[in-house]
Image: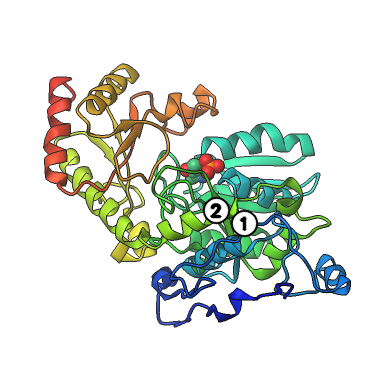
Amino acid sequence: MNNHLNPTTNNRQPTTNSNFHPADKIQDLQYFGEFGGVNPSISDSSTYTFLSAKTMFDTFEGNAEGCYLYSRHSSPMNLYLGQALAAMEGTESANVSASGMGAITPVLLQLCAAGDEIVSSRTIYGGTYAFMKNMLPKWNIKTRFVDITKLDQVTAAITPNTKVLYCETVSNPLLEVADIEALAIIAKEHNIKLVVDNTFSPLSVAPAKLGADVVIHSLTKFINGSSDTVGGVVCASQDFINDLKNVNDGASMLLGPTMDSLRASSILKNLRTLHIRMKQHSHNAMFLAQQFEKDGLKVVYPGLPSHPSHELYDSMINPEYGFGGMMTIDVGTLDKANELMELMQHRNLGYLAVSLGFYKTLFSAPGTSTSSEIPLEEQHEMGLTDGLIRFSIGLDNDIKRTYEMMKQCMTELNII
Ligand SMILES: *Cc1c(COP(=O)(O)O)cnc(C)c1O
């Protein structure tokens, strides 16, 4: 340790009880602040002093465990937040980043070199899709996009050059479910890494426990939950996290998507209520999905038996946290979708905004917003229709009242 005064020595490691689902460990983390505070002290320094020049040299060589060097590499609060997220996902380690894209892009650049290939689900976050499709070819890294629910398509797309199999647990925006256990077996057979973006399903699904090598989150969404910042995390083995942070060739270290430690502190505090929030998001979304399906609308929600992967998802989730807060409704045309969203916002049922995981319901038409990076004909091919509205259902206390009010809007617009 390089600290002259060492306030961190009284911090205890998270207790590990292997009987628990990894997601249940949020409550088990115990950190004390410098003066015995119930929250860890925020250390807002970009650089750290050393008592001896020799320790500084050792730290640069990566041989001084517990020493802080420079905050682009690591900082105390970022390590605390990373430890908490690693405990949540059941991985050895984690590295937080300034955004979800700041987690995804270094992982892909760390795992792939020129000439390598990626096999990816075609229904993924628009930014990830754009990075693979438009930027990675500059490094001569090619991506083959497949229907991730068709395992034979996945296997057929793998070549001797493939290094990464990439998917989202529950895809954005179509809510397709990836069979992570089956994909992990395919990845192992071909000696490639399975990278899973778990942004839509924190706590509900623990991809590392199902065999994923790397689990990524945009912390911007459910995990932070207050729509006041962007953030990201990579959860993986200690070796892979060390690779990302290597001062000579680590993509996170050298590309520099570092989270600020004040922000890490605020995200850590929000993380502590994630389990309560996820239950409410799931409960509310399930109620609305069931009601609107009964009303004859085209609803997609993994908790509905009509969802093509309902049984699979049911077998993957920790039932306590439910099927998640994301739902889509197809109201036929973009004009209808826009009218409905404007009316719902006007009645204070939520906001016409991208993103997800807020206390208030958020809705947007993905074809013209978050997935607009995907060319129109490809959108149609994957079933992303013009009238599709993506809902991130909020924490409404009286969801029946919300339902009645939403239904009223739909009746006025002749949607129901
Ligand atoms: C938002 C999102 C991202 C990107 O995260 P940012 O924090 O916006 O960089 C990646 N994947 C999914 C599934 C997302 O919803």
Which residue: 47% across, 55% down?
267
Residue type at numbered disc 2: Leu
Identify residue for label 1.
44
Residue type at numbered disc 1: Asp
Q: Secondary structure at mark 1?
A: loop
Q: Which mark is residue 53?
A: none
Instruction: Determine whether label 1 and label 2 are within 8 Å by CB.
Output: yes
Q: Is residue 162 visible?
A: no
Identify residue for label 2.
262
Which residue: 26% across, 54% down?
280
List x then y, in percent, for residue 68: 72, 66
> In which quadrant is the C terminus drawn?
top left
List x then y, in percent, for residue 366: 42, 30
List x then y, in percent, for residue 81: 53, 62
Is residue 413 toward the left or the right of residue 14 in the image? left
Q: Secondary structure at mark 2?
A: helix
Is the residue 203 above or below the residue 299 in the image?
below
Q: Quadrant of residue 54?
A: bottom right
Name the residue nearer the viewer: 47 or 175.
47
> In which quadrant is the N terminus drawn?
bottom right
Neighbour tally class for label 2: few under 14, some 14-19, many 20 plus, Cα within 10 Å = some
Is residue 415 toward the left or the right of residue 54 in the image? left
Which residue: 78% across, 39% down?
139
